Image (cartoon, helix red, strand yellow):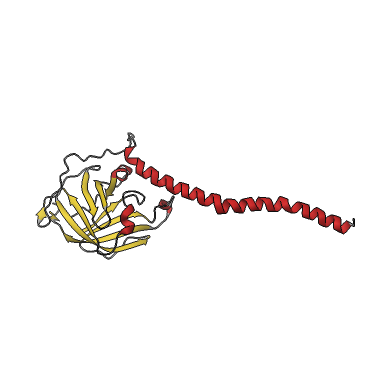
């Protein structure tokens, strides 16, 4: 055998040592990685669903639903409620999507485990935007089915508020065009694993149609 043929044969013998790892690498990228992502997404949804049954740690805020009685008053001026972080502040529902959840005063993981959390600076009935936050994979899962014009019902102990959805957007900042009284639902941009690391959020803005006005804060 000539020296040239001997070198060619030696070269071909090395090729499997290069191609075999590359084939396994390509197979893992095509099969294993997507399977891992599916498993992660399933785990995220499972954890969110199981969270209400988890025991509370000493660092958790205790939620309190005792004494919550929704008021049917939908106009006029009402007394400002005295709420503490962790108190049940409202019941949110949407007939068009089947959304129904408790809303607790304050944004924290205890609130998100049982429903939605209400930002504490502006309440329903105040001038401004009342903001509610929740998990996309659990409490706010049905928001993907919302459409412009759908009605959101927010029942509180000081009145019942009806809002009409006016804007649904995924962005890094909330909508700037709001009415004197608006409701803003905020959640992750999607319900996949690590979506909370995304700079974008899903914002649902709804304009008030009816509801009482809270008395002004005494200065």
Residue extending furthest left?
76
Horizontally, residue 54 falls left or right of residue 215, namely right
Residue extending furthest right?
2
Residue extending furthest bottom?
177
Q: Is residue 125 visible?
A: no
Relative image position of residue 149 (x, y in whole percent) = 25, 64
Residue closer to the observer: 115 or 121: 115
For the point 15% across and 44% down, which residue is it?
69
Horizontally, residue 68 falls left or right of residue 141, namely left
Residue closer to the observer: 120 or 140: 140
Horizontally, residue 138 falls left or right of residue 69, namely right
Relative image position of residue 45 (x, y in whole percent) = 39, 47
For the point 31% across and 42% down, which residue is it?
110
Relative image position of residue 80 (x, y in whole percent) = 14, 50
| The image quarter in which residue 111 lies | top left
**Looking at the image, is 93 positioned above or below residue 168?**
above
For the point 21% across and 41% down, which residue is it?
65
Horizontally, residue 98 falls left or right of residue 77, namely right
């Amino acid at each position: 055998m000539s020296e040239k043929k001997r070198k060619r044969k030696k070269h071909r013998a090395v090729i499997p040592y290069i191609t075999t790892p590359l084939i396994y690498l390509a197979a893992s990228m095509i099969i294993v990685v997507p399977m891992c992502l599916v498993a992660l997404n399933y785990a995220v949804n499972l954890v969110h669903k199981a969270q209400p049954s988890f025991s509370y740690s000493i660092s958790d805020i205790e939620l309190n639903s005792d004494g919550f009685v929704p008021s049917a008053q939908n106009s006029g001026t009402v007394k400002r409620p005295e709420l503490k972080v962790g108190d049940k502040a409202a019941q949110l529902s949407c007939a068009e999507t089947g959304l129904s959840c408790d809303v607790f005063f304050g944004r924290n993981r205890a609130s998100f485990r049982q429903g939605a959390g209400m930002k504490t600076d502006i309440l329903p009935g105040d001038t401004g935007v009342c903001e509610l936050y929740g998990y996309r994979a659990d409490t706010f899962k049905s928001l993907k089915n919302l459409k412009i014009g759908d009605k959101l019902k927010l029942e509180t102990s000081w009145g019942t508020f009806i809002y009409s959805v006016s804007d649904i957007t995924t962005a890094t900042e909330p909508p700037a065009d709001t009415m004197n009284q608006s409701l803003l639902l905020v959640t992750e941009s999607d319900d996949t694993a690590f979506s909370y690391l995304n700079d974008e959020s899903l914002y649902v803005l709804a304009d008030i149609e009816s509801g009482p006005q809270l008395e002004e804060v005494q200065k």
